[in-house]
Each structure stands twice: as C-alpha cells, then as structure tokens.
Amino acid sequence: MSVEIELKLTVPLKHSNRLLCLPLLESLSISCPRTHKLYSIYYDTPDFYLKNHGIAFRVRRNGRRWIQTVKDKGQISAGLFQHRELEVPVKNAQPDYTKIIDPELNQLFNNPALAQQLQPIFSTQFTRNTRLLHLEDGSKIEFCLDRGKISTDHSSMPLCEIELELKSGDATQLFQLALALQKVSPFSLRLENASKAERGYTLSSGHKRSPIKATFKPLNVDMCVKTALKTICGDCLGHLSSNENGMLKEGELEYLHQMHVALKKQQSALKIFSSTFPKETVVSLTQELKWLTTQFNPALDWDVFINTTLQTIQDSYADHTGISMLMRASKQLRHQHHKNARRAVKSKRYLEIMLKLGAWLTAEPLPSQLKTKNTLELANTLLNEQHQKLKKYGKTLMELNASDLHSLRTTTKKQCVVTEFFSDLYPNNKTSQYLRTLHKLHDIFGAVNANTAIKKLLNEVKITKKKRGQNEAIGIILGWTLHYSLQKEMELNRAWNSFNRISPFWPPETNQKLRQ
C-alpha cells in the first residue's frame, strides 16, 4: 500500500471560480489545468463494519475507467491527512476482492460473510480541476478543486474543497502553500478535518459527531525528546481540530470546551519543549494561542457560571423574577460570546495559526538545546520541579491571598498536564491516584476564587427593568458563592493533607531534593 499525504481546505462555492484564476497558481503551475468528472460509490455493511475497522472502501469512475480504492484511517490533524491506500483498476462498479493483495487487508476481505453483506452506502459526484505545482524548494504538489455533492438514498450535502496532495518533496510545503493561498485569497478558506468518507458516513447514519476528548499516543522511555514533542503536540493539534466542525455547526458548547482544553495543553507542551525550537518561533506560536484562548474564554466562563452556579440557585428560587431575568440575560451573553468564538475560528488569523502549527510539527526540528538525554529524564525533571513548587506553596497554604491561590491553581494545573503527558512512562497505578488528588485541589482552588470571578461576570449584565429584583438576585448569587467559597476553604486543608500523603510516582533518585 502506498502512503498518501494531502491537506484539505474548504472554499465557499460562490468564490471557487475566482480561486482558479489566482496568479499564484498560474506562477507555480507546470502542467495545464485539467478537468475530470468523478463518481464514487462507497461500500460497507449495514452496520458499518469496515468503518469501525478504520477502512474506507470505494469504487470510482474516472471517464471510462473504474478504480477500486481501499484506504486505512491513518492520521488526520489540522487538515493534513496521512493514510495508506491501495488502488487497482476493476472492470465496473462492482468490487473485485481478488484484487486486494495486501496481507493485512486479506484477513479482512477474505471473509465470505463480509463480501455478501457489502453494499453501496453513499456516493460522491464532483468535478475535479487539477494542476501540478512546482514549489521553490523543488517539492511537487497536485492542486485539486473538487465541486459537487455527497449523496445517500435520502439526502445529500454540497462539496467544495481544495486538496493539496504531496507528489514529491517536503510535506511542510503543503502548509506553506496553504499559507500562501490564504494570504492572496480575497475570501475565507478553512481547514477541512473530515474526509469525504467520514462526511458520507455522517450523512448516511444521520448521527452527528460527538465532541472528541483528548487522547495521547503512548510514549516510551527510550524516545528522544524531539519525537515526544511531535507526538504530544500532534495529539493536541488533532484534539483541537477534530472538534472544530462540531463547534461551528452544532452550536453545542462542549465542542468549544474541548477545543479550549486542547489549546491549554498545546500551550503547556510548547513551554515544556521550548528549548527544542528557536525562541522566536515558540514565542510567536504561544502569543497566537493566547489570543485564541482569549476568544474562547468569555463563552466558557458564562457557560460554567450558568451550569454550575446560576442553575443551582434558580432551582432553589424558582419563583424569583430577578433570578429568572438574570438567567435570560446570562444566556444571551453566553450566546453572543459563543458567536464571537465561532467568528474567531472562521477568521484568517485562526487558519494561519493552524497552518503554522502544522508546518512547525511537520518540519524537521533543529538540534535540541535541552540538557536532558531522553524523554524519561525530561519527565522526571519536570515532575520534580513542579512538585517542589507545590510543596513550597503548601507551607503557608492557609495564609495565601486570592492572587497566590490563583498562582497555586495554575501550578497545580501544570502538574496535571505534565503527569497526563508522561504517564505512559511509569508502569504503575500511582499516576492515577496522584492525578485524582491534583484535580481535587485544582477544583477547590477554582471554587475558592469563584466569588471574584462571578463578580466580574455580573458586571457585564445590563440592568434595565425591575432593578430592585435584579439587584436582589445579584445579592443572592454573591452571597451563595461566598458561602460556597468558604465551604471549599474548609475542604482545602483536608485535600492538601491527602496530597502530602501520596509519594511521587517517578523514580526515588530524582526526589532527593524533596527529602532534604
């Protein structure tokens, strides 16, 4: 099976003709533009057996020829698709399983019961405009503009996207070319993080894609720091981009919550591995990620306030007019901030951030300036340093002011992230216990500071009618959050004592400073 590497971008259909006339494409083209009409039938069982095994199986007509293609799930991150595929000519639209000669695929397709159940699930029909581009560094990229539709027996959806497929050279150039297109395009482009097959399955099943939570590929003790960097940052970027379509189309804030989690982890990873790349590169990426975080924060702050505080209070004061009015005003503010977050994700600046991150991860890193020899040594050092910081705070825990508690919460969160990143390097169950206590502390610190945070949110609410009722509602909310904060302060000492009783899970020789 060959490996296909391509980058996908969506383009508004009404602007697609203008795209083909961009001088940039003309200047890079080394072949005349060609037009093909492509029709593909995707096969699977009624219960999507192939999809569930990470396989897309289609038969495509191009002119008079039929091509059978099998693709594995591969890797998808920030619009970059890397997967293995097997393409063979066949006589007609009917699959020919005798042409599937790959050993791994044979085990799957040599099942007679599977062959009997395979049937058309959906189809794609589109016009493809192609040209071969030659870039300055010598890389060759095929530019394709696909315009058409994806169809099932009962519904269809439009299709208008760019595919940039690497034919030879450096995969980083896919991102560089996309950046160049973005700069000269008078209209918005957006990374596409779902393949045609994935969109077809979603259309066929009628089920929307649920928000995706973070997953990390396992690290190993002998892995070099640069490989660990690419693995962790690639997982963060994949987590971010996999929730993008849902955030834009479904309207549920859980997609945004997951994107925010991915952003914070990506920022932590950049800090951890900051010495692996030139300082100016890391600083630039970090600043852009911070900007994106500020675009997400207001919607998330209002969502947390409504779901964890205001809803609880309204349940206890069901007949209070002022609280009901505050709930409506709060939901309106949440909705507006969510629109602002979606606008940021649709912006050219967001696309540029994603493309620069993709290029950064795809490029060969410069020689590392880190003093550590491998990933395990780096993990031990980082875990030890953060743990010591937590211990120092703990000596005067009950005397800390609100600012110090916020700093302690930040340090606790950093240690959570570092532990999650490197937990695979420690084959014992102590990491889970350590993480549970850290998460407990982090939640308590957040609750202790809740009163200050909620005051800032309530200052955004415009009180225009029935001022007395709304002012009374604000008083109830602030009183409730103050009481809740005081309760959590009482829990803090117990939670800290639980944390103190847990021994670090990393090797004892790295903990000498803690015992001194």
Image (tube, helix red, strand yellow):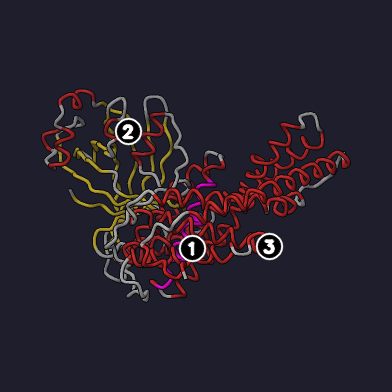
Sort mark 3 into few (<14), some (14-19) or many (20+) by Cα contacts within 10 Å. few
Are the two marked residues, 3 and 2, in contact with CB atoms closer than 8 angstroms? no
Q: Residue at x 80, y 44 (%)?
A: 474
Closest to the observer, 381 or 347: 381
Disc 1/disc 3 C-alpha distance (Å): 20 Å
**Residue, disc 2:** 123
Q: Which of the labelled discs sits on residue 410, or is there none? A: none
Q: What element carries label 2?
A: strand
Q: Does the magenta stretch include residue 296?
A: no
Q: Residue 270 at what x, y percent from top left?
A: 45, 65
First-in-chain label (3 vs 2): 2
**Residue, disc 1:** 387
What amino acid is found at the position of numbered circle 2 in the picture? Ser
Q: Does the magenta stretch include residue 271?
A: yes
Q: Residue furthest front?
A: 516
Label 3 vs label 2, nearer the camera? 3
Q: What element carries label 1?
A: helix
Q: Residue 115 at what x, y percent from top left?
A: 18, 27
First-in-chain label (1 vs 3): 1
Disc 1/disc 2 C-alpha distance (Å): 55 Å
Q: Can residue 360 be seen in this view?
A: no
**Residue, disc 3:** 399
What amino acid is found at the position of numbered circle 1 in the picture? His
Q: Residue 413 at what x, y percent from top left?
A: 53, 57
Residue stretch in magenta: 256-275
Q: Which residue is drawn at 26% across and 43% down?
A: 72
First-in-chain label (1 vs 2): 2
Q: Is residue 103 left or right of residue 244?
A: left
Q: What element carries label 3?
A: helix
Q: Is residue 481 left or right of residue 510?
A: right
